[in-house]
Image (tube, helix red, strand yellow):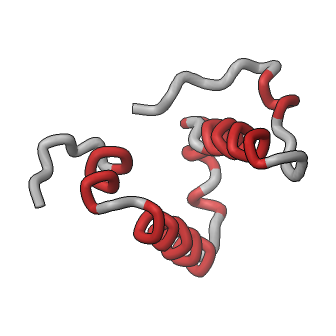
Amino acid sequence: MNSPPPSESGFEQICFGLNRATDERSLSFFLRLFSRDELLNALPSRLADEEISGLVEYLTGLLRRHLTEKEYHELFLGDYGHHH
C-alpha cells in the first residue's frame, strides 16, 4: 500500500546538493511524490518502451547492489514470510 500523500507544503523542502542528510530526506520525499497514485496512473502510458525497460533495469540494479535478498523480499516485495 502506498504511503499517505506528502503534505502540500513539504515539497518546498526538497533540496539537493547541500549535504548528505538533506539529500537523503529530499530523495525520500521526492520518491513519495513520484509514487503517488495520480502520477502512476498518468505516467506509464506516456513512456516509450525503452524508457520503461531502462527505468526497470536501473531500479532493479540499485536494489541488487544495496539490498540483501531478505531485505529485497521484505522491504520491496512486502514478503515477510520469505525463506531463502
Quarter occupied by the C terminus: bottom left
Residue 81 in the image: x percent, y percent? 12, 43
Near-viewer residue (68 or 52):
68
Near-viewer residue (82 or 3):
82
Residue at (48%, 73%) from the top-left corner?
A: 61
Side of 23 where 6 appears, left or right: left
10 above or below 42?
above
Residue 47 in the image: x percent, y percent? 63, 67
Figure quadrant of residue 75:
top left
Residue at the bottom extreme of this rendering: 50
72 above or below 28?
below
Residue 36 in the image: x percent, y percent? 59, 36
Residue at (41%, 69%) from the top-left corner?
A: 64
Residue at (82%, 38%) from the top-left corner?
A: 14
35 above or below 65?
above
Near-viewer residue (56 or 84):
84
Residue 73 in the image: x percent, y percent? 27, 52
Figure quadrant of residue 21:
top right
Residue at (76%, 48%) from the top-left corner?
A: 20
Quarter occupied by the N terminus: top left
